[in-house]
Image (cartoon, helix red, strand yellow):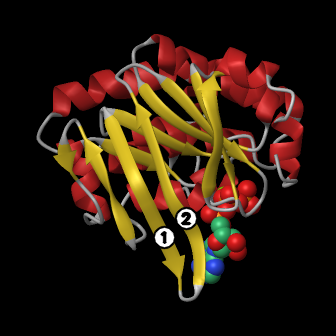
Amino acid sequence: MLEVVDLEVRYGAIRALRGISLTVKKGELVALIGANGAGKSSAMMCIAGALKAAGGSVRLVGEDITSGKPESIVRRGIATVPETRDVFPDLTVDENLTLGGYTRRGDAAGLAEDRAKMFALFPRLAERCGQPAGTLSGGEQQMLVIARAMMSRPKMLLLDEPSLGLAPVIVDQIFAMIAQLKAAGTTILLVEQNVAKALSVADRVYVMRLGRIAASGTAAEISAATDLSALYLGAEP
Ligand SMILES: Nc1ncnc2c1ncn2[C@@H]1O[C@H](COP(=O)(O)OP(=O)(O)OP(=O)(O)O)[C@@H](O)[C@H]1O
Ligand SMILES: [Mg+2]
């Protein structure tokens, strides 16, 4: 589904991504973990077209999408939930969902069906469908941005730190919903600092450190790796 080869991102003189390669197969949930500043969000934003690549390539189902415009990347099938968790605060929950489906405006029946699916997956959103999104709790806003991204019927979903700043009980709920999306066949690339949670839902894992992939393997292999904490804390492996 997704093939990233030697991807590089720079902010002026800062090399945030120093050539990372990763793949995500159809139906897989792949987690990208690593300490603060490892380059996880830079990788995600570059795949989504929000940052230009300084080198390397991104292919989606064999098609080169490197440094494409964000809207064209959404149209080709990648929906992104950035760590900023930005709802349209003055619009209702329902209106936020409608905007998530803007690339499919002509498909009223399909949009109605997807809205119903999202309300079934996130009952809290159904209860609050007429409420301005800015008045939702942090956890509810996280549910809304995930549901909104799903309204574009993406081939693939990119999630950046869905657990950020949320209480443990809410994090559990969000991860249960991510597991349900995966079970329904959604292909997911998940960026997380919460290693235990990421390992609990992921098929495969890439560990990033200082702009590079420091380790990769199945969730079971990475869980068993004795040097994981060293990698994670930034010590030399
Ligand atoms: N707009 C920017 N300008 C300059 N440097 C940046 C910018 N955004 C990120 N960086 C730098 O790039 C590196 C990677 O940042 P990035 O946000 O990708 O890390 P991250 O792994 O997502 O971290 P976190 O877990 O804290 O979200 C960091 O050293 C950061 O300071
Ligand atoms: Mg980040």
The three-letter amino acid code for the residue at tag 1 is Val
Visible residue check, residue 15? yes
Q: Residue at x 32, y 62 (%)?
A: 70
Q: Looking at this view, is 66 or 144 the one in front?
A: 66
Pointer 2 residue Cβ closer than 8 Å to ligand 1: yes
- Distance in Å between CA atoms under marks 1 and 2: 5 Å
Q: Looking at this view, is 18 or 48 the one in front?
A: 18
Label drawn at residue 9: 1
Left or right? Give the position of 205 relative to 7: right
Instruction: Give the mark, 1 or 2, whose residue is nearer the N terminus.
Output: 1
Position of residue 136 measured from the top left corner of the image (x, y, whole percent) = 68, 47
Q: Looking at this view, is 80 or 68 the one in front?
A: 68
Q: Determine the residue located farthest toward the top in the rendered image.
A: 183
The three-letter amino acid code for the residue at tag 2 is Leu
Q: Which residue is mark 2?
A: 17
Instruction: Find residue 125 and report its image quarter.
Output: top right
Pointer 1 residue Cβ closer than 8 Å to ligand 1: yes
Q: State if disc 2 and disc 1 touch (CB < 8 Å).
A: yes
Q: Residue at x 30, y 66 (%)?
A: 67
